Amino acid sequence: MNTSSVDLNTGASTWHVVEDRFVPSLAAGRESIFTIGNGHLSTRGSFEERIPGEVRATFIHGLFVTPPGELPLLGAVPDWTELAMTFDGHPFGADGALGGYRRSLDMRTGILEREVLWRASESGVVKVRFRRLVSMAQPRLAALEVTLTALTNPVELWLETGIDTAVPSPSFSVWNPLRWSRPSKSNLRLEAASIDGAHRLVVETSLSGPGRLEMIRDPHHHRFTSQTMLPVGRPVTFTKFTVYHSSRDSGEPAAPPGPDVSFDKVAAASGRAWARRWQAATIDIDGDKIAERGVRFAAFQVIGASPSDDTGAAVGAKLASGFGYRHHVFWDTDIFIVPYLTVTLPGLARNHLGYRYRGLDGARRKAKRYGREGAFYAWESADTGDEVTPEWTSPSFGPPSRIWTGEIEEHITSDVAFAAHNYWRWTGDDKFMRDEGMEMIVEGARYWASRLQIEANGAHIRGVIGPDEYHSHVDDSFFTNLMAGWHLRTAADLVEHMVVDTPRVAASMSSRLGIGPAGPESWRRLADDIVLLDRADGVWEQHAGFFELEPVDLSKFTPRLKSMYDLLGMERAERSQVIKQADVVMAMSLHPEAVGSRPRRKRNWDYYIERCDQGSSLSMAVHARVAADLGLGGEAYDLFRAALAIDLEDIMGNARDGLHAATQGGILQATIFGFAGLRLEGDEPVLRPNLPDSWDRMGFSFFHRGKRFERELTGTKARRRRAASPKSTKDKEERA
Ligand code: BGC
C-alpha cells in the first residue's frame, strides 16, 4: 500500500497530527494514535458513529477488573463517545458519501476534532464537526460537541447519545449496570458494578442542544434522543459532558456541567492546564518538522497516560491507548518513561514510584514464593504488585507456548531501583528516599544477596532472561548481573549514608528489615564477586556461551516483514546469536561508564548492532540514544526516525492494540539524553549535545533539584533558551 497518501506527517503545524483521508483498514490503529488522555481518563480515537472493526474504549487509571478465570485487565468503562445520527432518515457514516474528511489532534490543547462533509442520496449536504476532550483541569470530566450545518437544503436530524455499558473489553463487557436514573431532563445517571464485584462506578452525562430530549431505555445503553430540523447555513450544536466517579475516588460524585456551560469554556480550562504541562515539556526542533511533531506526539501521549495523582496507578506497556498487555505495567515504565518524567515533570515520576512502593508487598510475596529474601518485583503487575504475567501465550493459530518472563526476567527488580535512585539524584527528594525509595532499593538488594550463587570462580545468577528475550534460561546475563552489582553497591552506599545522616531512621529500618551492621559491607563484597564475562578485545558476552552460538548474517534476511524469531523458529533462534533488542547496548544507555571507555563501548556497539533484529518496540530508540552518545550521528538519526515510525506508521502492525509506551518514552530519552546529551556529572547536570545534522536548533527545558533550566542547543553548543516561558524567569537558573 502507498502509505504516503495516508501519512500523518502533513500540515504546517507540528502541534497537530492530521489525517485527511479515511482508510477503513487503518482505522483501529488510528484510534490508538488519536487517543486523548489526562492522567486519569484516556479515550481511544474511535469515531462517534460505530464502524466495523472499531476498538472503542475509555480507560480509568488503576481500575483493574479480574474476569472469572482470567488475569486482571484495565477494562473499558461505560462509553461516553458514541453518538448516532440520521439525516433525513439516512444513518450518518454508514451509507452516505464522504465529500470531505479531516481529523486533527491538537496536542497543545488536547482537543481532537473531526470534520466531515456528508451527503446521502436524495438528501442535502451536511457539514459535521465533532470536538472532544478529556479535561486536564478536571480529570474526571469528558466533553463532546457536535456542530451540524445543512449546506444545501434543510435536513431532518435524529440524534441519539447516552451511556453505553456494552462496550467490550476486549471481547465482553466488564461492567454491569445496576441502576439508571434521570436526575434532570437533560441528565442521565448510571450506577454500575464491575463483573468481579471489586469496583463501583457512577457515570453521569448531560446533553444540551435543540429539540426535546426523549429517552430510550435499553437496559445496557440508556440514551437521549433528539429530533430537529437543520436549517440551511445555520449551525446547530449539541454539547455533552460526562463525569466518572469510581470507588477508587474519594468524595461524592460531581454532576457534569449544565447547559449554561459551553464546550469552549471547558476546553479553555483544560487548555490552560495543558499549557502548564507544555511549559515544562515543549521540545522545539528547528529544521526537522517530522522530528518536532514526533517528539511532541510522544510527550503528549506519555503525559496524557501518566497518572496525575499518587493513588496506586501506573503507565501500562501500551500507555492507556489499547487493550494490549491488559495495561500491565512492565520495566517499560521504570526505564523508558520515568527517567524522562523525572527531568520534565518530576511529580508524575513520583506518582509512579508511589505505585512501585505500594507494590512492595506483592514483590515480597513473590520473593518468598521462590524461597528468597527481600523483594522480587513482578515482571507484569496490575493493581496489587503481585505477578500477573500469563504462563502461556494464546496464539490465534497453533499450540500455545510457555511464557517464562514472569518467573525469570529478574532484572525488573533493579529496573525499579534504578528509576527510584535516578529520580532521587535528579530531584534531591530526600523525603522520598527516606520514606519509600530506600526500602524498595534495600529489599531488592536483599533479594539479590539471597539469589546469587557463590562458586569458586565468583557469584553467578543462573537461569534468567535478560532484555533479549530470544534467549531464555541463560546464565550470567551481562545486563542482569551488571544491574544486580550496581543495585547491591547502591543499597550499601545509601544505608551507610543514612546511618550517618539520620541514624534513628536507619536504626528503625535496619531492625524492621533485618539488616545487620555487616549488611552493606557484605553486599559490596558480593557485588565485586559478580561474574561479568568478556573476551580479550573487550566485548562483553551477553550471557554465558553466547559467543559460541551460531552467527547469522542478518543482511541476508533483508528486507523482511517478520522478526527473525518468527523466521528462524524458537529453537533455532535460541541457538543463534540473533538478539531481539538492546541488551548489552541497553546496559550502555543506563551505566555507560560501567560498560567501559568510549572505544570499548564502540567495540561492543559494533558487535551487537549487527546481531540485533530490532524485534521489540523498545529497541530502536535505545539504540538511537546510545549511537548519539557514541557520536554516530547518521546512525543515531536513522534509528530515531525508525523509532518515530513504529507507532505513527504502524511499522509493527499492532497499533490497534495500543501505542508502545517504551517507544514513546524512548524517543523522548533519545532526544534529551542522546541528542541533547543531558546527564549528571557528579551532582551537576551537563549537556553534551550531538544534534543530528538536519537540526538547526533544539530548545527544551529540564528540572534539576527544583530548578528549571531552559536551554537551546546548536551543533555541539548549549546556551540559555531565548523567549523563555514566564515560569522560567521566576526560577533560578544554573549552569548546564
Ligand atoms: C519486550 C519487553 C517488554 C514487553 C512489553 C516485549 O516484547 O521484549 O522488553 O517489556 O514487550 O512492552
Image (cartoon, rainbow, N blue to C red):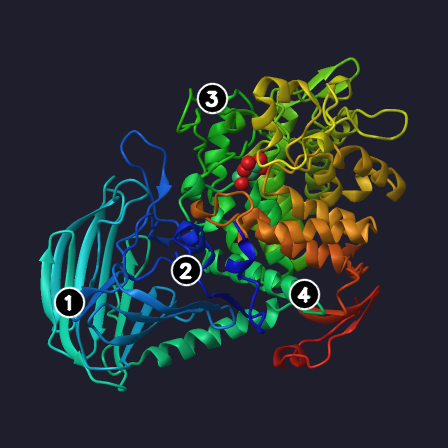
Marker disc for residue 702: 4
**CA–CA distance in space, label 1 to label 3:** 51 Å
The disc, 1 or 3, on the residue closer to the chain's N-terminal end is 1
SS for callout 1: loop
Above or below 87: residue 408: above
* Ligand 1 contact, mark 2 (Cβ < 8 Å): no
The residue pinned by badge 2 equals: 22
SS for callout 2: loop
Marker disc for residue 89: 1
* Ligand 1 contact, mark 1 (Cβ < 8 Å): no
For marks 2 and 3, give the one nearer the viewer.
2
For marks 4 and 2, give the one nearer the viewer.
2
Marker disc for residue 401: 3
The residue sitting at 28% across, 36% down in the picture is: 67
**CA–CA distance in space, label 1 to label 2:** 23 Å
- Mark 4 residue type: Phe
